[in-house]
Structures are given as structure tokens and as C-alpha cells.
């Protein structure tokens, strides 16, 4: 198979630890046996997805360097962070399900007596280097050590804004289990996580962790941490089901019709965590716009407004040319257009999907207005799913 090289050969010996490790041995053999691995690479559902910026490089440069737009790509003041996260999560959720968005795609889910941590990134930069790369725009809501025991850490794929070396090294010293897509376990073992704590899954495979059932489901994205993108680690979305609740985390993905199949097989969901940021016309196949994210949520719910949608993959790192406030603003607008409840907490603010949802557009306090201004009218500070009449049968 092409694309593999021993870390000890040539310049490989000098590669940063954050690059991780290439799959080998039985892990590599398992990758080759996967029905989703063909012609030496993992395949995307729905056909080939463009993983590199399309169009003119000049136009791409203009989009990133335009002075006015560049000013809109960052908050104009400190991003608010919930100050009592630790006290709030020390109490069990009254409804059995509580979500705490820690920023970007990192979410603590407390579900039916278990604690699941999705895509934890506590590092200062999403980069292999401490001195370069996108830097976080707000502090983490609380230290990782203060989070308390976690039953399972779920990783969607191996990009730096989802799989963070310092965070994994810190968690490697605990007894938590890691659920990861096929091939990603090579990175974790390289960083000190023992093989017996890995649950490494291909799409549609399932693992049991305590009272939870975790299923890796398809996504439309790509992988890679080194200088070359070899497509030898899988990317996934995740379904987590407890005794009474079901939740879904999209990871990174472009829109595809497979959301309907995931919903039909595993849904409906009490809450979804959907990627709606870092989209661009230059890479439309691998990230969703807010409108596409809302469409994905509805597909997952059988075509109707149901549960709560938590927008993720925005607000923490500047990764695309769109305005910083745009993902949150347009997701709320998309939800209002279809009658879907959207939770928009500040980082670290816990909420229960069956209770009061944080819906205040807090980003407006620290952002320049979007072109065309803010949509009106504004929703009340909090509302519940019952208030919006979104709870259907089933």
C-alpha cells in the first residue's frame, strides 16, 4: 500500500509528536478489510468529496485578506464564558440528559447516569506547534482536571481541532475509555493510551461502555495530521444511546443524504450536536452551512422538528473566511424558519434539552453586526421545547 512510511526513516524521525502515528500491524490489516476502504484510501459516502480548496487561489486569498471581512472574523470583545460550570455540573441533571458545550466541537454529555466527552480540545492552539496555528478565542470554561471522571471520550476524526495532543495526554492518565474511528487508535497508543482502553470502530459498528451503546456512523469529510493527507484514518459521526435518551454528534461533515438513514436506524434523538461553522464555498463538500446543518438535523429526526439542536464547530477558533458571528446567527434564523428549537449557550453553560434552552444571541454583544444587520424579532432569553410545541409523538 502506498502512503505509509516508518517514522524512523528519513525525516520521519524528526516529525513532531503531535503528528501521531501511522496505522500498522493488525490495525492496518483491519483498515484494508474495511468495506469503506478502496484504492488505498477511505471513501466518502455520496461519492468523492473535494478535500482541498477549489476555485482560484487568488480568490481564496482575497476572501481571507479582505480587511473589512477580516475584522468580522473575530469577536470585538471578550467572548463570555459561563462562570459556574463546575458547580452546575456537580448536580445530576433533573431530566437525565444534560449537555455542556465547552467551545468548538467539545461537548460534555451527561446521559442516563454516564458522562461522555466529545472531541475534547483544551489546548491553546489547534496545531502541531505551540507557537503557530489558530489560537482559541476564549478560555476553556474550566480546567480539564476539574471536569471529574468521564466514562468515555469520543473522537470524531484526527484533525487538530478535534484530536488535541495535550488533552489526550492528560486523559491518558485516567481510566476513561476512548471510542474512536478506525485507524485513529494508532495516534492514541503513540501518546500513551493503552490498547485495552480503545474501542476502535468502522462505520456502523457498535461498542458497549457501561450502560451506553456507541455507534460510529458515516460522515463526509477527510483525515490527516502530518504533511501528507493519506486518508488512512477514518472519520465518523457518533450515536450514543442510554437507557432513556439518544444523542448524536456530527463531527465534521458535509451535507449528504445519509443523515436520513442514520435517523431512520438510530433516531429520533433527544438532542443533536451539529457542525455549522468553518464552511466556505471553497470547500463545500466537507463542512456544512447553518442551513445545511438544520437540514441535517431534520433528516436525523425523520423530517420533523424534534428535540434540541446544539450548533458546534464555531466561536472558538477562526478557521474560515465567514464572519465570526455568522454561524450562530444563521443557525438560529434557520431554526426559526422551520420551528426547530436551537440551543445557543455561551461556552460552559450547561442545559437540559428537555428543559429551558439558552436561546439569547449572546454573540451580538461582542461582535460587529453582520452585513444587513441582525434578524428581528429577538427570541426571549429562555424557552422550552414545550413552549415551542416541538415535542411530537415518539
Image (cartoon, rainbow, N blue to C red):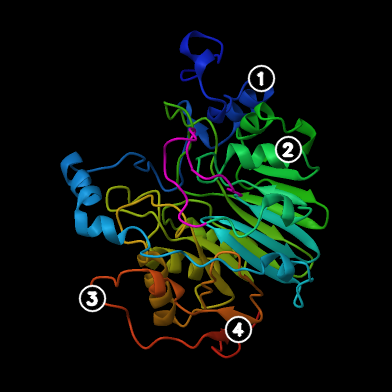
- Report how far apart the C-alphas of labels 3 and 1 lie in the structure: 56 Å
Image location (x, y in percent) of residue 352? 66, 75
Residue bearing mark 4? 392
- Which one is closest to the eye, mark 4 or mark 1? 1
Label whose residue precedes the other's in the sequence (2 or 4): 2
Residue bearing mark 1? 25
Label whose residue precedes the other's in the sequence (4 or 1): 1
Q: Can residue 60 be seen?
A: yes
Image location (x, y in percent) of residue 28? 61, 24
- Report how far apart the C-alphas of labels 4 and 3 lie in the structure: 35 Å
- Report how far apart the C-alphas of labels 4 and 1 lie in the structure: 49 Å
- Which one is closest to the eye, mark 3 or mark 1? 3
Residue bearing mark 2? 172
Image location (x, y in percent) of residue 154? 65, 49
Q: Element at badge 1?
A: helix
- Which one is closest to the eye, mark 4 or mark 3? 3
**Magenta run includes residue 71:** no
Q: Residue furthest right?
A: 210
Label whose residue precedes the other's in the sequence (2 or 3): 2
- Report how far apart the C-alphas of labels 2 and 1 lie in the structure: 22 Å
Camera-side residue of 318 and 281: 318
Residue 372's disc number:
3
Drawn side of residue 129 relative to residue 215, left or right: left
Numbered range of the magenta stretch:
120-138
Amino acid at each position: 500500500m502506498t502512503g505509509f512510511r516508518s517514522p524512523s526513516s528519513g525525516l520521519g524521525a524528526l516529525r513532531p509528536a503531535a503528528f501521531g502515528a501511522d496505522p500498522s500491524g493488525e490495525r492496518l490489516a483491519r483498515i484494508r478489510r474495511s468495506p469503506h476502504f478502496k484504492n488505498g484510501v477511505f471513501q466518502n459516502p455520496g461519492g468523492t468529496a473535494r478535500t482541498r480548496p477549489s476555485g482560484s487561489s487568488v480568490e481564496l486569498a482575497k476572501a481571507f485578506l479582505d480587511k473589512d471581512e477580516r475584522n468580522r472574523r473575530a469577536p470585538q470583545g471578550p467572548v463570555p464564558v459561563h462562570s459556574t460550570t463546575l458547580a452546575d455540573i456537580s448536580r445530576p441533571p433533573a431530566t437525565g440528559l444534560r449537555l455542556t458545550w465547552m467551545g468548538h466541537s467539545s461537548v460534555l454529555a451527561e446521559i442516563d447516569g454516564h458522562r461522555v466527552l466529545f472531541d475534547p480540545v483544551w489546548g491553546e492552539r489547534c496545531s502541531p506547534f505551540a507557537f503557530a496555528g489558530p489560537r482559541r478565542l476564549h478560555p476553556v470554561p474550566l480546567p480539564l482536571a476539574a471536569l471529574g471522571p468521564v466514562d468515555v471520550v469520543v473522537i470524531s476524526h484526527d484533525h487538530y481541532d478535534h484530536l488535541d495532543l495535550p488533552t489526550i495526554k492528560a486523559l491518558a492518565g485516567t481510566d476513561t475509555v476512548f471510542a474512536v474511528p478506525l485507524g485513529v487508535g494508532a495516534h492514541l497508543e503513540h501518546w500513551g493510551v493503552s490498547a485495552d482502553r480503545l474501542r476502535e470502530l468502522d462505520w456502523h459498528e457498535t461498542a458497549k461502555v457501561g450502560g451506553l451503546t456507541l455507534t460510529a456512523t458515516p460522515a463526509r469529510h477527510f483525515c490527516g495530521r502530518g504533511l501528507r493527507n493519506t486518508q488512512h484514518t477514518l472519520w465518523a459521526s457518533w450515536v450514543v444511546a442510554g437507557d432513556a435518551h439518544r444523542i448524536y454528534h456530527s463531527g465534521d461533515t458535509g451535507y449528504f443524504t445519509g443523515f436520513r438513514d442514520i435517523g431512520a436506524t438510530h433516531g429520533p434523538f433527544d438532542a443533536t450536536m451539529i457542525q455549522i461553522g468553518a464552511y466556505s464555498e471553497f470547500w463545500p463538500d466537507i463542512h456544512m452551512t447553518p442551513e445545511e446543518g438544520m437540514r441535517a438535523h431534520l433528516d436525523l429526526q425523520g423530517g420533523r422538528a424534534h428535540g434540541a439542536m446544539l450548533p458546534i464547530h464555531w466561536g472558538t477558533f477562526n478557521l474560515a473566511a465567514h464572519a465570526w458571528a455568522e454561524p450562530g446567527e444563521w443557525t438560529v434564523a434557520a431554526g426559526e424558519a422551520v420551528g426547530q428549537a436551537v440551543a445557543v449557550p455561551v461556552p460552559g453553560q450547561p442545559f437540559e434539552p428537555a428543559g429551558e434552552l439558552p436561546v439569547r444571541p449572546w454573540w451580538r454583544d461582542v461582535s460587529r453586526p453582520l452585513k444587513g444587520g441582525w434578524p428581528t424579532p429577538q427570541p426571549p432569553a429562555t424557552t422550552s421545547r414545550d413552549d415551542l410545541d416541538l415535542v411530537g409523538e415518539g
